[in-house]
Image: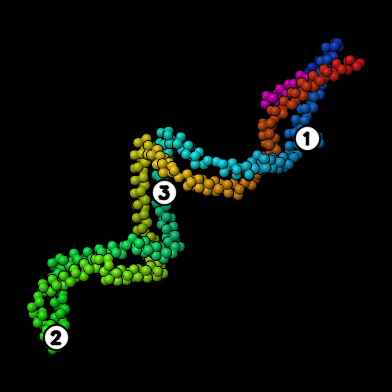
Amino acid sequence: MKTRYLAGTSLAVMGAGFLITLFLPQNLAVRLLQGGFEAGLVGGFADWFAVTALFRHPMGIPIPHTSLLLQNRNKIINSLISALETELLNKDSITKRLRQVKLFKGLSSGILKLVSRKKIRLKVIDTVSDVIRQVPLEQMTPSVQKALVKFLQSQDLSPVLESVSRQAFRSKVDEKALNYILNFAGRWVSQPENEYMLGQLAHNKLQEIQLNGMKGFALQAMLGFMSEEKLGNILKNLILSSLHEMSYEDSPFRQRILTEVRQQVSDFTENPEVADRLKGMIGDKLADSGTEQWMLSKLEEIRTRVLSILEKEQNNGGRGIIKMYRWITNNLRGKEEMMDRWEQGILSLIVQAVEANYYRIGLLVRDNLDQLDDESLVQMLEDKVGGDLQWIRVNGAICGFLIGIVLTVIHMIIA
């Protein structure tokens, strides 16, 4: 430390000067210098003792009230922590400062500076690609599968089924399904082979009916001139007419069918046994080994696609990152109220974390200081403030020299 050498040199100069003046012929100049060197030697030695006594025992002698830093180590640490917590980094000032931070504005400016540099964009893409490549999908898939099964088992599917059914009714899925069935039935009945099949079925069933008397005679007479083709044509027209009538929204038959369907669906979704059975079926399917392989193949497929997109983006210089940044900023522009809400929410969480963990600052400082032994602590303090303290010794020697000359002059005048 240069200042320590300078301080030692100043003390040596004072001592050497005083010794030399003792052997010189006594005259006015020598007497003035002798008085100055004597006072400078006393002042420099006194200041050396004072500065040294702060850190250690002077000359290794355990003189009372020396080595003050080590003897008062706990007091100094407590004072330092107290000053840190109450003055330098008090909780109120940190909280106030945090609440004044424009988080999103600073974050936006920082991100803009980063994405404007091509090197940074390419580095981001490389990092993301490496992370995606190193994801252990084979080890991760069983854990994901078990987590899904566990999550499903902990859920009650009844509210989900009820919500789905309500959404389906609001979207008129039941009416769309009924229209599809009516259209399909109309197309099916209109096909000639199906028309003939209906006539054949009806003719066979009518022949199986056993009636006596005039009813039986009338039935046989009708079957005698009613062929299967005619009977099928009649049935087709009856069915098409009924289907056409049910296609109107104000049809009473249509409304009865829809009401019955909705009632059955509601009863189905509100039945807890249905939800439990559905949960069991889905859980068994998720836990199946084939599902694990399917999930792994899908994850591998997703990874391949993502890496392909990232490779194209890298070849493009990472311009997609800029487009993404602009898209996000454009979507958030004009939503200052929402952004302020988000920002205050995030800052509140940070403030809560600071308030909950503020005491750890003092604990951290104390822990770090406690890890230092006496020699390391003294060395650290000397490195930080020792240089300035050594100037006290230099100033003491110089001031003592000057004061010694003045006192010598006064002594000579009085004498």
Position of the N terminus, as image quadrant, is top right
Quickly name the residue at label 1.
66
> For mark 2, does the 10 Å Cα neighbourhood hold few (<14), some (14 to 19), or many (20 or more) residues?
few
Position of the C terminus, as image quadrant, is top right
Q: Is residue 375 above or below residue 262?
A: above
Decide which of 4, 106 is in the foreground and name it. 106
Would residue 212 be visible to someone looking at this image?
A: yes
Q: Residue at x 67, y 31 (%)?
A: 383
Residue reaching furthest to the bottom? 213
Q: Splitting the image into 4 quarters, where does residue 153 fall?
A: bottom left
Disc 2, disc 1: CB below 8 Å? no
Decide which of 149, 228 is in the foreground and name it. 228
Q: Residue at x 35, y 48 (%)?
A: 302
Residue 7 within the segment the image draws in magenta? yes
Disc 3, disc 2: CB below 8 Å? no
* In-image side of 26 versus 274 (left or right): right
Quickly name the residue at label 3.
136
- Distance in Å between CA atoms under marks 3 and 2: 81 Å
Quickly name the residue at label 2.
215
Decide which of 357, 234 is in the foreground and name it. 234
Q: Is residue 246 above or below residue 26?
A: below
- Distance in Å between CA atoms under marks 3 and 1: 63 Å
Residue numbers of the magenta segment: 1-15
